[in-house]
Image (cartoon, rainbow, N blue to C red):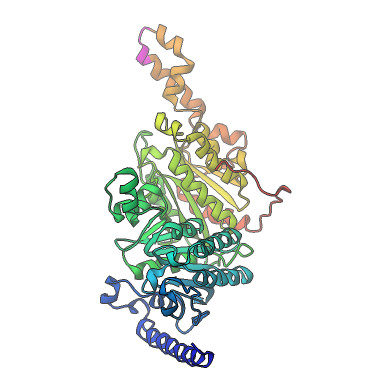
Amino acid sequence: MPFASLRIKAHKMEAKIKDLNEKLALAYLGGGQERIDKQHQKKKLTARERVLYILDEGSFEEIGALVIHRTTEFGMEEEIIYGDGVVTGYGTINGRLTYIFAQDFTVFGGSLSETHAEKICKIMDLALKVGAPIIGLNDSGGARIQEGVRSLGGYADIFYKNVQSSGIIPQLSAIMGPCAGGAVYSPAMTDFTIMVENSSYMFVTGPNVVKTVTNEEVTSEELGGANTHATKSGVAHITATNDVTCLEDLKKLLSYLPQNNKEIPKHLPYQLQEEVRENLSNIVPGNANKSYDMHAVIAEIIDANSFYEIHKDFAENIIVGFARLGGRSIGIVANQPLILAGVLDVNSSKKAARFVRFCDAFNIPLLVLEDVPGFLPGTDQEWNGIIVNGAKLLYAFSEATVPRVTVITRKAYGGAYDVMNSKHIGADMNFAWPSAEIAVMGAKGAAEIIFKREIKSAENPDEKLKEKENEYAALFANPYSAAQRGFIDEVILPKDTRIKLIKAFSMLENKEVERPNRKHGNIPL
């Protein structure tokens, strides 16, 4: 095509895109939470609709709208579509500069070409230079087959930039359609991944390949749907019912985060009020064998309705998420006594370790709520590497330099006591409720080992065991022995927990730690 004709066509296309953006902005940005009507909430939005929905009205500036692919093989020279299957640019979300790309499944199935990748890389480079978050709205069938190695090289370029940006700017991914093959690895290297239920899936190899290689019959949803990755693999941190809720989740998640690793999250205005929470006094049962919901503890401690849970349906024996405390953004790691008594296992250790490292990278203080009877025993756990996976959490806490505060609500047994942000691995403030039990193991198990002979020779072994159990509990199954040695800074009443934490995090706000001069540590991956 002659250059003059191409230029005229490009100008027309540019005007068309501008007009489309304006029309969509009027249609989808006109009324707060009511911006998308019920009909649109039920269906998939287009790539451009997604971008205009999540960004503030009138803030989107598109980059690379006139880019076209360079492929001439297989008749591709006749398939010229401006933008080449991805919308890229920048805008603001609640006034904060944010970079964004959205893959367009209606253009070659959202497949990644050389120029498609170049557009994404350009946006990633800008985000890194400026120090602002980047959001990827993924909806791609994978590499563009017609381009061969050029497409594969494009993926590798994106992967490399994901790694270079990691820990410097927040990287958020939404899976809003199919993501197969190379398309799954970039989201996996970003900080958080949200999947849309019933319309998105992620897998390295699809159901047809699985059937050919392993003879397994499996659907796309079973193999890599949102529910699968939220509950079984842990690949998805959050699931959303539709495109709109997915985009709202991204905005909410972003509100807890800073722009980059040199900033701290924005503090919301807060005036101290009546901070005593009487309900905390009645949450932990008097019987140490009874469970309770740690969510109830969290709800009483934090600012009202501010908890945003991450990985809610994966490794439920530990809770992680963001909240606000006195207007300050914090990360919470908490054992969940309702599930497996709150023990640490392979999945919960990995889940918590990754969250701790994210918070540390982006200057988000950490609150740990501890009620842990130890590590989960069994051949399954040992053979699947509970040693090395438990060490990941230990490493993550030991490495973290953000303000770190622990509250022991009940059990803190064995090595799990050390791992859950103990004073010995660098925690700044460690509180305990009077109900806390800090010991090598439970009183009954300890008594059975220490007083084995005495119990065996007693006239009434059961009565002697109970006597020795009480003796051990009086000496060790309480927080006071640890407090006497300075391992616990203060034994506090549950109702005073919130005010103690507000003051502690305020005191620690300007904490600084000199790291060892090294290239990087060797976390037990």
Q: Does residue 462 show up magenta in the picture?
A: yes
SS assignment for the magenta stretch, majority: helix
Q: Nearer the viewer, residue 324 or 376?
A: 376
Magenta region: 459-463
Q: Is residue 254 magenta?
A: no
Q: Quadrant location of residue 74?
A: bottom left
Q: Nearer the viewer, residue 52 or 460?
A: 52
Q: Is residue 128 above or below residue 459?
A: below
Q: Position of residue 503 (x, y in %)?
A: 57, 55
Q: Residue at x 70, y 49 (%)?
A: 519
**Placement of 334 over or under 51, stated as above or below:** above
The answer to whether any part of residue 378 appears in the image is no
Q: Is residue 427 above or below residue 164?
A: above
Residue at x 35%, y 45% (from the top left corner)? 213
**Residue 426 vertical position relative to residue 147 in the rendered view, above or below:** above
The quadrant of the rendering that contains the C terminus is: top right
In front here: 223 or 71? 71
> Which residue appears farthest toward the right when viewing the image?
517
**Residue positioned 42% across, 85% down in the render:** 21
Q: Is residue 448 visible?
A: yes
Q: Quadrant of residue 421?
A: top right
